[in-house]
Amino acid sequence: MKKTLYIFALLLMLTSAANTFAQKVTSLTISLYDGSTFGVEFDKSVIAKQIEEVTIDGIAAGKHYIKITPTNATKPIYSSEITITEGYTIRAVIDEYKSFYVYQKYKYRKTKGGIEITDWEHHNGNRDHDEENYRVISDPDFVDLENIAAGTPFDETRTELLKYGIDRSYFTTDQVNSLIKMLTFETYKVEIAKYAYKKTVDKRNYLRVFGNFRYSSSITELKDYIDSFK
């Protein structure tokens, strides 16, 4: 009898641990499109008062209320319900149109060895409050943009093609880095780095872009440009 009770208790502990883990793999990371600081309330609880990016872990699937208020502002720029799907790590931005946009998702799954691994999901879609909608350029469209630009032999023309593509979608910092690396001359690299900044959803990571430049003058030019938005 004692052995049976011990096994039952052990099963309860394992089930509880599994449920705790399942909750923890569902999380939401939020930032503002311009990289500025903000306060956030989630399900009526204050999560942070002044932060550039916040991650909320252990979110249950379903609808949740979120309110985002820029630092030094009296009114929120976003206040609404969002829908969270279980088992995802979600990265979202409050954009210049005051909309909630998911631009990346990690989907977790178990291997035969029981190790959790992730799969990236990149999508695009219509503006909505539902986290299933995306707008960052899709992988196939991004490859098309790269291939078209790569077929142009001169930096000047290639830069114009890249600008044309940037005007028509949104990008992650890593994607911007890939576009910059397609150019030879630093002048054009800086031009694209500046041009793409407004269309980059994870501006908090834009520091990575500075690694593309050899000259301090280029770094200063881009930094001054970014500072002009603050």
Image: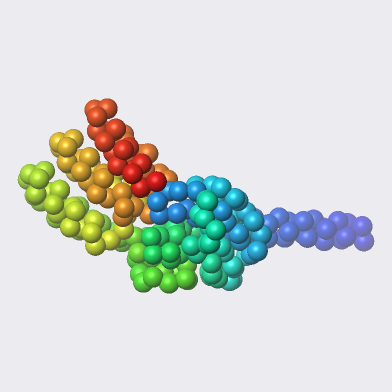
Q: Is residue 203 above or below residue 27?
A: above
What's the residue at 52%, 51% (across, down)?
71
Q: Residue furthest right?
A: 1
Please indicate, yes or no, whether residue 228 appears anywhere in the rendered image: yes
Task: Classify residue 145 by image quadrant.
Answer: bottom left
Q: 222 or 87, which is in the foreground?
A: 222
Residue at horizontal 14 percent and vertical 54 percent from the top: 161
Camera-side residue of 48 and 71: 71
Q: Is residue 23 above or below residue 188?
A: below
Total marks in image: 0
- Colour setting: rainbow
x, y percentage for residue 107? 48, 59
Q: Quadrant of residue 228 in the image?
A: top left
Q: Residue at 27% across / 50% down in the picture? A: 196
Depicted 117 relative to depicted 15: above or below:
above
Would residue 25 be visible to someone looking at this image?
no
Of the pair 105 and 207, the residue shown nearer to us: 207
Q: Position of residue 156 (x, y in %)?
A: 9, 45
- Residue 54: image x %, image y %? 54, 51
Position of 78 with respect to 18 (left or right) is left
Residue furthest out toward the left:
153
* Quarter of the picture holding the N terminus: bottom right
In the rendered structure, the answer to whether residue 227 lies left or right of residue 88 reads left
